[in-house]
Image: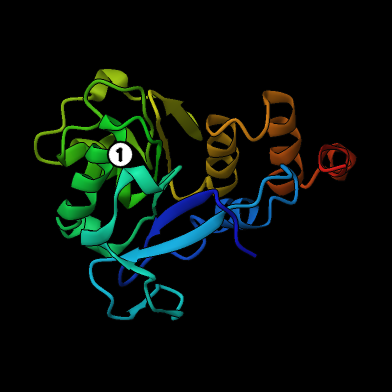
Amino acid sequence: MLSNRRIHVAVYDTLADWEPGHLLAELRTGRFTGRPHEVVTVGPALDPITTMGGLRVVPDLALSELSPRDSELLVLPGAALWDAGGGEEFADAARAFLAAGVPVAAICGATVGLARAGLLDDRPHTSAALAYLQGAPGYRGAEQYRDERAVAADGLITAGPDSPVQFAAATLVELGLIDDELRAAYEGVFSSADASRFPELMAARA
């Protein structure tokens, strides 16, 4: 399933499989939005990576080839490399995307990488916890921290590792693919197991 709408997801060793899962499934299928996207994986190089769950992924694209001009979104999942102080090249890519007006969605460890890069200092954001970000050298965004499941502001969507559903929903709203009412239905079904909201999702794709 291909589309002229394209999003890019960063892949690297120990990527936390569950964090971008809901988002990528909704973007690729368009099952509740009616707008499928092509999902392109971007690695540090073209060498295969292994996720935290043991999945082997061969990147479609090397990071050096990535351009905001060719994308509607950059997704940065969590992984051990962020906590080890790495990921600078992906943080630089995020900076370029934001400067070009293309949204960036970062979850869990990726938020600490963006914190080190100063990209959270002037934007409302969230993460696993404020204390987690405060351990990042150079982070000066504590006043912008929000104790919420997911936050979207100025083209940047952030979330903690316990909020993959909220991360997906907030990103879909940011992209204009769903509205706040459908976001509530999506979170109701996939986070709260509220089956009564499922007809709203089905109606949205009719």
Q: Residue at x 47, y 66 (%)?
A: 17
28 with respect to 80 (left or right)? right
133 with respect to 161 (left or right)? left
User: How many numbered badges does the structure rendering display?
Assistant: 1
Q: Residue at x 57, y 50 (%)?
A: 23
On the image, the x and y values in percent for residue 128 come to 38, 42
Residue farthest left in this picture? 138
Q: Residue at x 53, y 30 (%)?
A: 174
Using the rendered image of the protein, determine whether residue 107 is visible from the camera's viewpoint. no
Specify the quadrant of the image occupied by residue 196: top right
On the image, the x and y values in percent for residue 185 come to 76, 35
On the image, the x and y values in percent for residue 131 come to 26, 36
**Screen quadrant of the N terminus:** bottom right
Q: Is residue 192 above or below residue 25?
A: above
On the image, the x and y values in percent for residue 20 come to 50, 55
Using the rendered image of the protein, determine whether residue 75 is visible from the camera's viewpoint. yes
Q: Which residue is mark 1?
A: 97
- Give the SS element for disc 1: helix
Which class describes the residues within 10 Å of circle 1: few (<14), some (14-19), or many (20+)? many
158 with respect to 99 (left or right)? right
The residue lying toward the viewer, choosing from 35 and 120, is 35
* Figure colour scheme: rainbow
The residue lying toward the viewer, choosing from 68 and 85, is 68
Q: Is residue 100 above or below residue 48?
A: above
Q: Residue at x 71, y 31 (%)?
A: 184
158 with respect to 169 (left or right)? left
**Screen quadrant of the C terminus:** top right
Mark 1: which amino acid?
Phe
Specify the quadrant of the image occupied by residue 166: top right
